[in-house]
Amino acid sequence: MHHESHYATVTEAINKLRERGFDLDFNPGKNCVICNGQKFNAEELEIVDVYRYEGNTDPSDEAIVYAIEAQFGLKGILVDGYGASADNDTSELIKKIRIRK
């Protein structure tokens, strides 16, 4: 997994990932990830990078930024909460996606 640095904020991580070509928005669907109306199963995706952020004062600020690559070189970002703000369905789906070594 690629880790140049850990960015200070979620916004900074997203901006830097976009500069690296992760310019699509991946969104959780029911047992799939959706991008531009196209549905991807976990087997069609690979997590390239992960950045985790803890809220200093508010647990609802906790988030994980995933840099994901899909078939045919499509690259994008999926943001999910964790801890108190985690979405269980999304978390379970993410666990099924292969992580690039």
Image (spheres, helix red, strand yellow):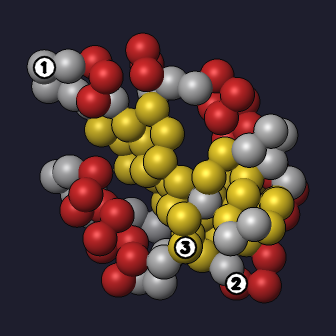
Quarter of the C terminus within the rendering: bottom right
Residue 88 located left or right of residue 19: right
Return the residue found at the far front: 37
Residue with the mark numbered 2: 73
Return the residue found at the far top: 84
Q: Nearer the viewer, mark 2 or mark 3?
A: 3
Q: Is residue 89 above or below residue 67?
A: above
Residue 30 located left or right of residue 50: right
Residue 66 located left or right of residue 90: left
Q: Residue at x 58, y 26 (%)?
A: 87
- Secondary structure at badge 3 equals strand
Q: Which labelled disc corresponds to residue 57?
A: 1
Query: Nearer the N terminus, badge 2 or badge 3?
Result: 3
Q: Which of marks 1 and 3 is in front?
A: 3
x, y percent for residue 25: 54, 65
- Cβ–Cβ below 8 Å for labels 1 and 3? no
x, y percent for residue 54: 27, 30
Q: Would you identify the image quadrant in which residue 24 lies? A: bottom right
Q: Residue at x 47, y 84 (%)?
A: 21
- Secondary structure at badge 1 equals loop
Query: Nearer the N terminus, badge 2 or badge 1?
Result: 1
As measured in the structure, the alpha-carbon distance from the residue carrying label 2 to the one carrying label 1 is: 38 Å
Residue type at mark 3: give it.
Leu
As measured in the structure, the alpha-carbon distance from the residue carrying label 2 to the one carrying label 3 is: 11 Å
Residue with the mark numbered 3: 24
Residue 36 seen: yes
- Secondary structure at badge 2 equals helix
Q: How crowded is mark 2: few (under 14 residues within 10 Å), some or many (20 or more)?
A: few
Q: Residue at x 80, y 39 (%)?
A: 30
Residue 95 located left or right of residue 40: left
Q: Would you identify the image quadrant in which residue 75 lies? A: bottom right
Query: Nearer the N terminus, badge 1 or badge 3?
Result: 3
